[in-house]
Image (tube, rainbow, N blue to C red):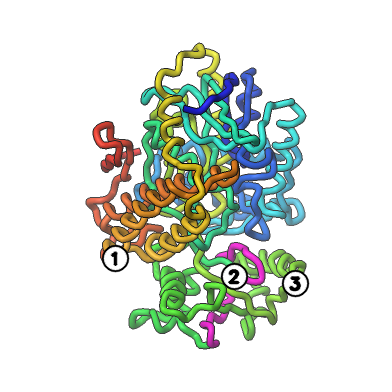
């Protein structure tokens, strides 16, 4: 077994994105001693810090974009998109606390764009009203403001701490085990632990996430005994991959751009059913960025993915897109549409990076984005494992089969604050307790990996990502999902013998194992859900089914150590 040193704190926050920083400040406000473990660098890592769009969207139903908007309308939009897969209690919290969360950010200097005396707000994905408030430079202003405040308060943040396990006795979480910068083990004993480790989009070869988002929270929580839900639902959509990586804003489909394959030939019409035109699917696609089986916009991603799979893609793994001959006079004249409001910002952002959207072609593909599922939480971010809290993309419940654009950043703030306060309250009420066998379980898990000089773990990661792109990203069916699950077993066996002679190599192996475990959760849930609903699309079960109007809840089987899945309400 490995030697380790021990640290103690009231509230341990794992992660460094928007949800983490908000949780840190909320727990500190309650008088708790707070420690933050960060895989890379505090304030400069995580999905919130990683810019993949020209602007950030932050939903608030304050009437800035439409005076008829309200929390009730906002609630209905969220539940409609969720298609029965969201927790109404958490949705109520979101819609009623979104505005106060924006005011909190403004208090620390976060600037939301304005049009004269009103907030600039556009209609984002799946929304019926323009309520997405605009942040330039994506979400970096949130990171900068809250990060500076955490530093000013002297919060203890430890960089390059790869958390490898939650110390649990199966009922209570007692802290976490991490690998430090030197490769040594550190046990942080904590009265409360908050997971804000983001999603798992590095599972896919094409993704819009930084390299440190590797499903760590999902995998560690499952191994520790927490329940997860909605793991089959994720956001994937069209992104730019050349000359740079960037999310392709849904409002841009209003221009009906030209899409062609590697040989310059249009291809979307080759994959459309009779009676549906390219113009029809593009106009529907203007409503939302993420792929959804719920409307005909799905044929955009389906046709792109099938063209690539059939060898019609570029060497970069994409297809070409341009705006030549689009009717910009008409589009820009209508300021009531999102295109007219957002094009000036978008055009200048691309132009600053060397691309003139009026004349230049770019390459696009289907890329993984956010996971809509995660740990089951209550109104205060508490999970089914006592002492463990979760917020942000790590948590399930505020979203469902589809998620409104502009909701994730706001969700991170609302539930980050709630989790921070609840974790601090718990820390006041409990004492540090004995850990039992929790540390031994983590050490045994780490011992499975050889740290020898075998196969390069990066090769295994690449094969994993390619397999996920083929069978889990957009096009899912029983044969492909079973094939993917079989590949995961083989990849995990090879990973345990992979080369890991340095600290960073070993961390990479652990991350890949977390991705494999998360991929298994997603594929198991996708295989069980023999229907198409929102972001989950089954080629062999094209319609939604009333037998699946509940969420799949995943937990670890005490008997086999494998997965136990059940349908239930969140």
Quarter occupied by residue 5: top right
* The C terminus sits in image quarter: top left
Is 338 or 136 nearer to us in this picture? Answer: 136
Image side of residue 344 versus residue 5, left or right: right
The residue beneath circle 1 is: 542
Q: Are marks 2 and 1 in contact (CB under 8 Å)?
A: no
The residue beneath circle 3 is: 354
Which mark lies nearer to you, 3 or 1? Answer: 3
Counting from the top left corner in percent of width and height, residue 175 is at 51, 25
The numbered mark, 2 or 1, whose residue comes first in the sequence reads 2
Q: Residues within 10 Å of mark 3 (few under 14, many from 20)?
A: few
Is 88 or 116 nearer to us in this picture? Answer: 88
Question: What residue is rendered at 48% in x and 45% in y?
Answer: 215
Quarter occupied by residue 470: bottom left
Question: What residue is rendered at 67% in x and 53% in y?
Answer: 138
Question: What residue is rendered at 47% in x and 70% in y?
Answer: 284
Counting from the top left corner in percent of width and height, residue 176 is at 51, 28
Q: Is residue 310 above or below residue 178?
A: below
Q: CA distance from mark 3 to mark 1?
A: 41 Å
The numbered mark, 3 or 2, whose residue comes first in the sequence reads 2
Disc 1 element: loop
Is 484 or 63 nearer to us in this picture? Answer: 484
Q: Are marks 3 and 2 in contact (CB under 8 Å)?
A: no
- Residue 60 appears in view: no
Q: Is residue 553 above or below residue 281?
A: above
The residue beneath circle 2 is: 252
């Amino acid at each position: 077994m490995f030697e380790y040193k021990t640290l103690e704190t009231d509230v341990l926050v794992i992660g460094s994105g928007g949800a983490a920083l908000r949780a840190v400040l909320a727990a500190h406000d309650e008088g708790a001693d707070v420690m933050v473990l960060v895989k890379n660098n505090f304030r400069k890592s995580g999905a919130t810090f990683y810019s993949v769009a020209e602007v950030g969207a932050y939903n608030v139903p304050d009437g800035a974009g439409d005076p008829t908007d309200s929390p009730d309308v906002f609630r209905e939009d969220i539940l409609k998109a969720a298609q029965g897969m969201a927790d109404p209690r958490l949705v109520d919290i979101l819609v009623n606390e979104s505005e106060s969360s924006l005011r909190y950010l403004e208090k620390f200097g976060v600037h939301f764009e304005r049009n004269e005396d009103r907030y600039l707000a556009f209609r984002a994905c799946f929304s019926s009203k323009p309520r997405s408030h605009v942040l330039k430079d994506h979400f970096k202003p949130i990171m900068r403001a809250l990060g500076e405040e955490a530093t000013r308060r002297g919060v203890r943040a430890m960089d390059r701490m790869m958390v490898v396990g939650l110390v649990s006795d199966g009922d209570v979480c007692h802290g976490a085990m991490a690998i430090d910068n030197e490769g040594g083990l550190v046990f942080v004993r904590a009265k409360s632990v908050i997971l804000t480790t983001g999603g798992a989009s590095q599972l896919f070869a094409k993704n819009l996430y930084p390299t440190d988002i590797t499903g760590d929270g999902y995998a560690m929580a499952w191994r520790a005994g927490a329940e997860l839900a909605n793991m089959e639902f994720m956001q994937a959509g069209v992104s730019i991959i050349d000359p740079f990586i960037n999310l392709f804003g849904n409002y841009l489909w209003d221009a009906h751009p030209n899409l062609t394959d590697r040989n310059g030939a249009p291809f979307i019409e080759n994959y459309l059913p009779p009676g549906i035109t390219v113009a029809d699917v593009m106009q529907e696609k203007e409503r939302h960025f993420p792929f959804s089986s719920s409307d005909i916009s799905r044929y955009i991603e389906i046709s792109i993915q099938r063209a690539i799979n059939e060898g019609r893609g570029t060497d970069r793994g994409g297809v070409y897109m341009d705006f030549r001959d689009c009717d910009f006079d008409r589009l820009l004249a209508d300021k009531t549409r999102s295109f007219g409001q957002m094009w000036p910002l978008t055009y200048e952002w691309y132009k600053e990076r060397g691309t003139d959207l009026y004349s230049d072609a770019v390459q696009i593909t289907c890329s993984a984005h956010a996971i809509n599922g995660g740990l089951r939480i209550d109104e205060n971010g508490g999970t089914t494992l006592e002492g463990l809290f979760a917020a942000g993309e790590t948590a399930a419940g505020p979203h469902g089969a589809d998620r409104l654009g502009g909701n994730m950043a706001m969700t991170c703030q609302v539930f980050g604050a709630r989790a921070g306060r609840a974790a601090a309250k718990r820390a006041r009420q409990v004492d540090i307790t004995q850990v039992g066998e929790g540390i031994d379980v983590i050490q045994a898990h780490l011992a499975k990996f050889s740290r020898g000089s075998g196969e390069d773990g990066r090769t295994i990661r690449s094969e994993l990502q390619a397999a996920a792109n083929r069978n889990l990203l957009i096009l899912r069916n029983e044969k492909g999902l079973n094939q993917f699950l079989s590949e995961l077993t083989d990849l995990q066996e090879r990973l345990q013998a992979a080369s890991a002679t340095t600290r960073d190599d070993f961390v990479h192996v652990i991350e890949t194992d977390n991705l494999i475990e998360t991929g298994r959760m997603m594929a198991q849930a996708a295989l069980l859900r023999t229907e198409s609903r929102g972001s989950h699309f089954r080629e062999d079960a094209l319609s939604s089914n009333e037998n699946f109007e509940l969420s799949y809840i995943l937990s670890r089987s005490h008997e086999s150590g494998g997965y136990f899945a059940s349908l239930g309400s969140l």
